[in-house]
């Protein structure tokens, strides 16, 4: 048996005088988490073998045998029959060992001109590229769901807040579009990160390249990589592409988390702006009346673990000298968990967005409290010639008087309003309404229903 393929119950190779203990075996093994890269591992091996055969490094017969063996292994894995052995440490050695069992010497020739170091770096990139493509689709679907919600409520008015205090009236469509913008940028970040993921490490071998006449560009083309990694030491050791992905994922989750926070507040009976379909909520084991927004709360919570994975990977990388170190085996669990958490969260959020019921009456009632149109009154005075700072002061007096009387600005008569500024005329009542306030913010990026509809069309166009 070759050194690479000896079981760890035995010594690694003739170089070793004793086997590793069971604890060391378990400690150093990665097969129970890296087996999820089996597909990528097989794809990478087939592309490598094809190139070896094309270059005359292995024979066409060996390549055919490898193809046959790999097809068999693929079906064994798919049907759950493949036996994963801790003794064989990782996904790479498990598959190679089985290949050799199936096709003999051809299997032993597969690893020519290759190391597990460039092999694993290739596998991670292939795995992550496909995860990014899934995530791009999910981000698109979430945005489509939010765009539908925005369209249905392009005219629905609610209070906009700053400091969690009523600020100005806005449309619910506009509020949803704020999140759409965040997810647009997230999708851009994912697409950008994919460019750097999509480069081929294979050919770097252990660290310095190989003495065989390989054709790296051929392998890159076969596997759909845009380029090859240009330095063998860097190719096997850096995981910055995975860190970059985790940073992009942490930002998506942060946006999801902010939205979750709002959904939770909006669903509180004290606010009552929305309801979330029962299938996304749970009850209480003790309080029969409860319906809790568990999904957004958990999404908010899971943001913490994704942020943690980012910091974990940065810390994993920071002290490593060139080139490959076993530390890098620790990149997988945080990366996989980030992919799983983000994927599930995006999928559930798109579904949940379609299960949100908006309650326009409660939103409107809230917008009518808190003098949300005070800025509109100030702007009105400015348009009549008053400097803005004086207008601000005049309206502050009016709000204070309303507060003392427990009424709204619209409850004041024209004469009462004129006590704060002689510039006020009967046309003031148009600007004090919620509809007048939102309709007036009619420019790109503004909250007017017409702008909301234009923005929706813009993003729909972007999404194709
Ligand atoms: N399981 C290893 C990892 O994930 C594969 C590479 C092993 N390389 C080595 N030189 N021990 O990093």
Image (tube, grey):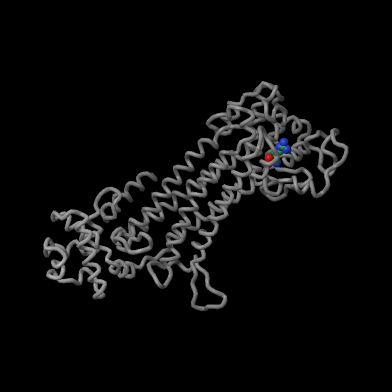
Q: Is residue 450 above or below residue 291?
A: above
Position of residue 109 relative to residue 191, above or below, is: above
- Residue 361, by quadrant, is bottom left
Residue 220, located in which quarter of the rendered image? top right
Residue 332 in the image, given as x and y percentages of width and height: 64, 45
The residue at the point 22 percent across, 61 percent down is 393
Q: Is residue 86 visible?
A: yes
Q: Position of residue 209 (x, y in %)?
A: 67, 26
**Percent from the top left, x then y, of residue 200?**
59, 32
Give the farthest residue toward the right: 17
Residue found at x 52% / y 55%: 345
Residue at horizontal 37%, vertical 56%? 176
Could you tell whether 97 is left or right of 126 in the image? right
Which residue occupies 74% across, 29% down? 109
Where is residue 387 drawn, in percent x and y?
18, 53
**Ligand 1 quadrant?**
top right
């Amino acid at each position: 048996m070759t050194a690479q393929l000896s079981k760890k119950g035995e010594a690694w190779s003739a170089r070793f005088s004793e086997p590793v203990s069971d604890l060391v075996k378990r400690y150093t093994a990665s097969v129970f988490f890296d087996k999820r890269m089996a597909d990528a591992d097989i794809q990478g091996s087939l592309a490598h073998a094809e190139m070896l055969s094309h270059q005359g490094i292995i024979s066409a017969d060996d390549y055919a045998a490898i193809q046959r063996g790999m097809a068999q292994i693929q079906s064994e894995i798919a049907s759950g029959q493949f036996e994963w052995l801790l003794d064989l440490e990782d996904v790479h050695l498990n598959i190679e060992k089985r290949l050799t069992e199936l096709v003999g010497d051809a299997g032993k020739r597969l690893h020519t001109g290759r190391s597990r170091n460039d092999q694993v770096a290739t596998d991670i990139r292939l795995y992550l590229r496909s995860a990014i493509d899934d995530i791009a689709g999910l981000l698109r679907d979430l945005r489509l769901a939010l765009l539908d919600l925005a369209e249905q409520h392009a005219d629905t008015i609610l209070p906009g807040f700053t400091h969690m205090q009523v600020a100005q009236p806005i449309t619910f469509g506009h509020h949803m579009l704020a999140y759409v913008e965040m997810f647009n940028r997230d999708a851009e970040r994912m697409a950008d990160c994919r460019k750097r993921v999509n480069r081929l490490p294979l050919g770097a071998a252990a660290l310095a390249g190989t003495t065989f006449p390989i054709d790296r560009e051929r392998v890159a083309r076969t596997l759909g990589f845009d380029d090859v990694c240009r330095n063998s030491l860097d190719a096997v050791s850096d995981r910055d592409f995975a860190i970059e992905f985790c940073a992009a994922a942490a930002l998506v989750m942060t946006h999801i988390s902010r939205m979750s926070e709002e959904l939770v507040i909006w669903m509180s009976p004290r606010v009552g702006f929305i309801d979330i379909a029962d299938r996304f909520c749970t009850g209480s084991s003790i309080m029969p009346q409860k319906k809790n927004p568990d999904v957004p709360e958990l999404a908010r919570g899971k943001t913490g673990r994704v942020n943690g994975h980012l910091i974990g990977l940065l810390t994993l990388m920071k002290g490593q000298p060139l080139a490959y170190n076993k530390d890098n085996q620790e990149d997988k669990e945080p990366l996989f968990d980030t992919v799983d958490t983000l994927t599930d969260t995006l999928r559930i959020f798109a579904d949940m967005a379609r299960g949100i019921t908006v309650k326009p009456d409660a939103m409107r009632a809230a917008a009518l409290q808190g003098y949300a149109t005070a800025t509109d009154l100030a702007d009105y005075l400015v348009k009549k010639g008053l400097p803005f700072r004086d207008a601000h002061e005049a309206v502050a007096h009016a709000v204070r008087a309303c507060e003392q009387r427990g009424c709204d600005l619209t409850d004041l008569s024209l004469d009462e309003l004129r006590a704060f500024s002689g510039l006020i005329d009967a046309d003031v009542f148009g600007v004090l309404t919620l509809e007048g306030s939102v309709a007036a913010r009619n420019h790109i990026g503004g909250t007017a229903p017409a702008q909301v509809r234009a923005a929706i069309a813009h993003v729909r166009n972007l999404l194709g």
